Image: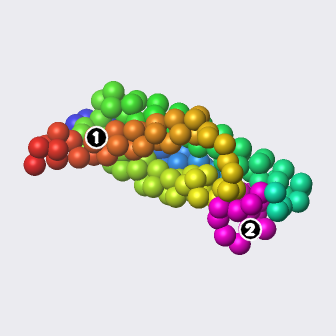
């Protein structure tokens, strides 16, 4: 491998690391807002009608913000993992990038899970959220597959 390829990879890895830290900060901020909006609840699922109108509005606003962030992050991650595959990096270098992404995805997944667990008792079916969750899992599996490689699947 040439020094130019190594330098390009180092730049990509550093850029990815910096980007993931910013994305993680956004996810943590959304979690903080969502947790604050559900602070009036002792256990889940909860009766939304027992909350004040202000609490209901805060919950809805924070839930929608977290849901939108989930959708946006999933779309960006999908694009990113596919782009890594086309780059001219070595397989080990690609694995390093995928591992960074998987680490981020594991943390983000634990926060996005709040959309399933911290809910009122009667929440209408959210097909778009289900599609985002399925896509998030496909992206995660795609990244894991690329870390394992074909040999990992056969062995």
Q: Is residue 42 left or right of residue 99?
A: right
Q: Position of residue 56 (x, y in %)?
A: 82, 54
Q: Position of residue 41 (x, y in %)?
A: 74, 68
- Viewer-closest of 11 and 150: 150
Label pair 1/2, CB-CB below 8 angstroms = no
> At 74% from the left edge and 60% from the top edge, which residue is drawn?
47
Q: Is residue 25 left or right of residue 39?
A: left
Q: Quadrant of residue 103?
A: bottom left
- How packed mark 2 is, by other alpha carbons closer than 10 Å (few <14, some 14-19, many 20 or more), is some
Residue at the limit of the structure toward the right, as seen here: 53
> At 55% from the left edge and 45% from the top edge, which residue is drawn?
19
Q: Position of residue 113 (x, y in %)?
A: 55, 55
| Mark drawn on residue 146 | 1
Q: Which residues are magenta?
A: 32-48
Colouring used for the render: rainbow
> At 45% from the left edge and 55% from the top edge, which residue is drawn?
106
Kindly report the distance in space between the C-alpha atoms of the residues bearing marks 1 and 2.
41 Å
Residue 36 lies in the magenta-colored region: yes
For label 2, the residue is 41
Of badges 1 and 2, nearer the viewer stands 2
Sequence-wise, the earlier of marks 1 and 2 is 2
């Amino acid at each position: 491998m040439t020094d130019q390829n190594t330098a390009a990879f180092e730049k990509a890895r550093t850029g990815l690391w910096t980007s993931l830290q910013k994305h993680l900060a956004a996810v943590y901020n959304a979690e903080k807002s969502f947790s604050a909006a559900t602070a009036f609840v002792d256990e889940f699922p909860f009766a939304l009608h027992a909350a004040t109108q202000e609490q209901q509005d805060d919950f809805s606003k924070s839930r929608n913000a977290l849901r939108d962030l989930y959708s946006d992050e999933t779309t960006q991650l999908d694009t990113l993992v596919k782009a890594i595959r086309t780059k001219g990096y070595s397989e080990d270098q690609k694995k390093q990038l995928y591992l960074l992404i998987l680490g981020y995805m594991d943390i983000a997944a634990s926060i996005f899970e709040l959309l399933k667990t911290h809910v009122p008792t009667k929440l209408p079916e959210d097909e778009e959220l289900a599609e985002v969750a399925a896509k998030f899992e496909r992206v995660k599996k795609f990244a894991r597959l690329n870390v394992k490689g074909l040999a990992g699947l056969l062995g």
